Amino acid sequence: MYAAVFEDLLARLAIGVSQGLIIGLLALGIVLIYKGSRILNLAHPYAGLVVAFVCWWLTSKASFAPFSWLPFALDTKPRFLLCAVIALAFGVLNGYAIEHGVIRRLKGQPRLVVLVATIALAQGSVGFVLLLFSRNEEQASVLRRFPTLFTGGIRLGNSTFTGSDMISLVVVPVLCLALAAFFRYTRFGVAVRASAENVDAARLLGIPAARVSSFVWMAGAFLAGLAGILVTQVNGSLDIGTLSTGFLVRGLAAALVGGLTSLPGAIVGGLYVGISESVLKYATNDQSGVPETLLFLSIVAILLFRPGGLFGRPEATEDKVAFVPTVRGLPTRLRGTLSDRGVRAISMSAVLFVIPLSLATGAAVNGVLIDIAAYSIVGVSLVVLMGFAGQVSLGHWGLVGVGAFATANLVTRVGVPYLLAIPMAALIAAAVSLVIGLPALRIRGLYLAVVTLAFNLAAESYLFQSRFVGGSTAGIQITPPKLGPFDIDSPTRRPLFALTFLLLLLCLWIARNIGRSRTGRAFAALRENEKAAATLGVDLTRAKLQAFALSGAMAGLAGAMFVSATRIAEPTTWTTARSLVLVAMVMIGGLGSLTGAVLGAFIVFGLPQLLDFANDWVVSLGTGALLLTVIVRLRGGLAGLTQVARRRVVEQLETLDQPAKEQPASEPAVPVA
């Protein structure tokens, strides 16, 4: 008996080492890019996703020239090896294009702004893969595999250490040794290290910083691509879910454990993540969600007690968030004029037009309007947290899920009246948001973003699947009741839209008044510069916790409306990837504007449904392209555009309204004698 247990544990350790090396390879690319450009690249695993799919297509599907000229048949081992080289070369070119086309354009921008740009790149990568390889059900149902290079394996207990696991044990250490030799013994490798240590001093020594930046992005893309191919080999199949947010959080956790400035630390961190995950699965009988929860707790603990990781140095975070660009408002002379009031009235009429639209249309359009209003509430909550207070959240969809599950549990399990359950769900979400906000008292900027992202993954994988919160994986049914003459569960969906719209107006009113209050001024000072705000007497702890609580409460309200619309709270709804889309939504709309929250929700989620092209690849590609455009060209977002248009219209109306100035009468002509 003990021998069997020992063999099982040994097998899990060996599998954990194999997976840990692959995660370490991914983390190595994250650290390399961070050292070379001081950018935390959230699109890093998505580069591996693209390379893995391109490699599979070249290996299994490409049968026309010039790929038909390859001397190997489809799905053979030699063809796979050759196509892997071609796909990795494509990944390197992709890294070069990203660095030249996007990163260089954002030179001098705050690191948090560039972080959001990498979210746009991640969305674009997912859209690219969905467009080319999963446009329809037939494509999506294809089982994608790579040819197995080594069919041998070692059976230990109930587990098998496969040939693919053995390959990762060889490839990753050899590659790490090659990289170590490159950075130590080559002139350009030494130049990269020098530039990573101090870019200004490196420039003075004649080191080309632009070439170094291009190299680290190309090398990072290569490492991500190789990690994507290796993890597909180990898992046995190629899937978007495997190489997206879960892969990202594991890579970030490994990088933070080892230290964002330590290349060897990335491998050590990867081994920690891989072995911990494998052993925890063995100890919990493969219960899902436990490793993800451990990752979240590990990230928080490391950032709180050892911000530099095991081998790195603590990194100074930026005090100024600078997410919110300055948008020129109306001049003082034009505010409150008849033209200004008229334009405001027209804008308000356009907003209230949704009421007759809801009355004149059917259930389908009302369902879309409910989505727009609910996502707008989420947008308002993010504007309060990120736009007003400057606290970064990449896991906000998890808070919306907390509100949804709280509503379903209160109504279905506890028997709380529906109208009372909604504010109670908001309070529960606010309390959870406060718990997440506690690390923000010591963690800022990029690191806080990683913490919130890991929270969403832990909530998706464990919290929402637990019996206590989520009723296991089946979810919790909810039936909105009939409230007098208003049947919230009406087939027309008009009453539910009316309730959601009223809650949106309430959130807009609260956020607008908060922004104009003393608390709002404290939020603004916190956003612009924490040290300066503390010097001016702002209670930073109170301001941060207030922002998280208020934002969490609004997210909980949105969750209550979502679960009322879907009639079920289930774990698969609250994915971590959606949190990244929400950040893109508010940035596209205009992060500093409450109007932008509504505009972003309409463009990202409403318009595709209304025009009936709400395919996943359309949303991903469109969101990524719009977000990049906003960051590079239009920092104020759609709200900035509307503000400019409003200013021009008011100025033009005022010009037309002014009476023409009287011209002086001409002198009569004097006759010449």
Image: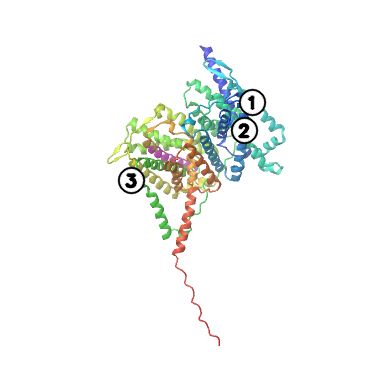
The residue nearer to you, when weighing 13 against 245, is 245
Residue that lies at the very extreme toward the bottom in this rendered image: 673
- Residue assigned mark 1: 173
**Who comes first in sequence, dot 3 or dot 2?**
2
Between the residue at mark 3 and the residue at mark 1, the CA separation in whole angstroms equals: 65 Å
Is 610 drawn above or below residue 567 in the view shown? Answer: below
Amino acid type of disc 3? Leu
Labels 3, 1: front one: 3
* Residue extent of the magenta highlight: 540-561
- Residue assigned mark 2: 66
- Residue assigned mark 3: 359
Residue 475, given in percent of the width and then of the height, sits at: 39, 29
Residue 315, given in percent of the width and then of the height, sits at: 59, 38
Q: Is residue 89 left or right of residue 572?
A: right
Picture quadrant of residue 564: top left
Amino acid type of disc 1? Pro
